[in-house]
Image: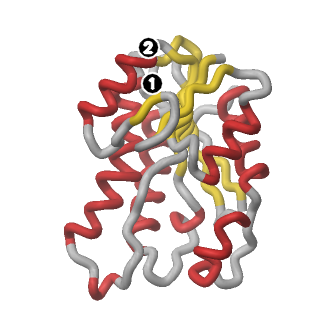
């Protein structure tokens, strides 16, 4: 299969590429690196990406930023960052990409454990992740022959030096284990599934 991996140079993305490149053709996409570049916050950039790549069999998104900070100090502009980047960025991939994914193909988006298990300073992330999961559940009923799922990972083992203090008491998962959920989505038959790798 020809698979587009957005966020391929990130920790999760690298794990996905390593897992899938053994038996699939991987197109690596990043904001500044990779075979192609895309800014998920800009619709024209997403359209330009698919115009360059042409038809693919699957789209995986392991990209998108959110804002971490105390709710009491958060501005609307800061909150909107996560909405425009991680939420609408992945929604844009589906809305535009549905015309470029071959029949029977799939989308796999990335949410996260904070949708169900919030942490201090993580209101924006929890909101975005929960909204993404709602989008996947509903979009699965209307994609006409295409599948869509999401992977919801816990904090990555590789990210513990940076994010460990925010996830006190959480069990981590290595990127290689998280990547298996993306393989399951791409190679399997599920539609509207949220793979929780906790």
Residue drawn where x is 57% and y is 72% of the image: 117
**Residue 109 rendering spot, x and y as whole percentages:** 52, 42
Regarding residue 80, the answer to whether it shows in the image is: yes
* Front in this rendered view, residue 149 or 88: 88
**Residue 170 rendering spot, x and y as whole percentages:** 69, 76
**Residue 52 rendering spot, x and y as whole percentages:** 39, 18
Q: Earlier in the sequence, mark 1 or mark 2?
A: 2
Which residue corresponds to mark 1? 143
Could you tell me which secondary element the residue under label 2 belongs to? Answer: loop
Number of residue marks: 2
Q: Quadrant of the C terminus?
A: bottom right
Q: Which image quadrant for residue 74?
A: bottom left
Could you tell me which secondary element the residue under label 1 belongs to? Answer: loop
Which residue corresponds to mark 2? 54
* Front in this rendered view, residue 55 or 135: 55
Residue drawn where x is 71% and y is 56% of the image: 197
In the rendered view, would you say 84 is above or below 108?
below
Q: Which image quadrant for residue 54?
A: top left
What whole-number distance in Å separates the C-alpha atoms at marks 1 and 2? Answer: 19 Å
Q: Which mark is residue 94?
A: none
Regarding residue 148, the answer to whether it shows in the image is: no
Residue drawn where x is 40% and y is 34% of the image: 93
In the rendered view, would you say 65 is above or below 104?
below
Q: Please, which colouring scheme is shown?
A: secondary structure
């Amino acid at each position: 299969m020809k698979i587009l991996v957005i966020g391929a140079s990130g920790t999760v993305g690298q794990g996905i590429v390593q897992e899938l490149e053994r038996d699939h053709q991987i197109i690596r996409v990043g904001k500044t690196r990779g075979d192609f570049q895309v800014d998920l916050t800009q619709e024209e950039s997403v359209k330009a990406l698919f115009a360059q790549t042409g038809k693919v069999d699957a789209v995986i998104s392991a990209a998108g930023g959110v804002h971490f900070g105390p709710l009491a100090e958060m501005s609307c502009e800061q909150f909107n960052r996560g909405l425009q980047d991680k939420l609408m960025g992945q929604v844009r991939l589906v809305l535009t990409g549905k015309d470029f994914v071959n029949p029977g193909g799939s989308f796999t988006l990335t949410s996260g454990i904070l949708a169900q298990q919030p942490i201090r300073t993580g209101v924006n992330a929890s909101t975005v992740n929960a909204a993404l999961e709602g989008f996947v559940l509903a979009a699965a009923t209307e994609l006409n022959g295409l599948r869509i799922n999401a992977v919801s990972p816990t904090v990555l083992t590789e990210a513990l030096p940076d994010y460990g203090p925010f996830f006190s008491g959480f069990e981590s998962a290595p990127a290689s284990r998280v990547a298996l959920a993306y393989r399951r989505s791409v190679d399997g038959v599920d539609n509207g599934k949220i793979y929780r790798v906790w």
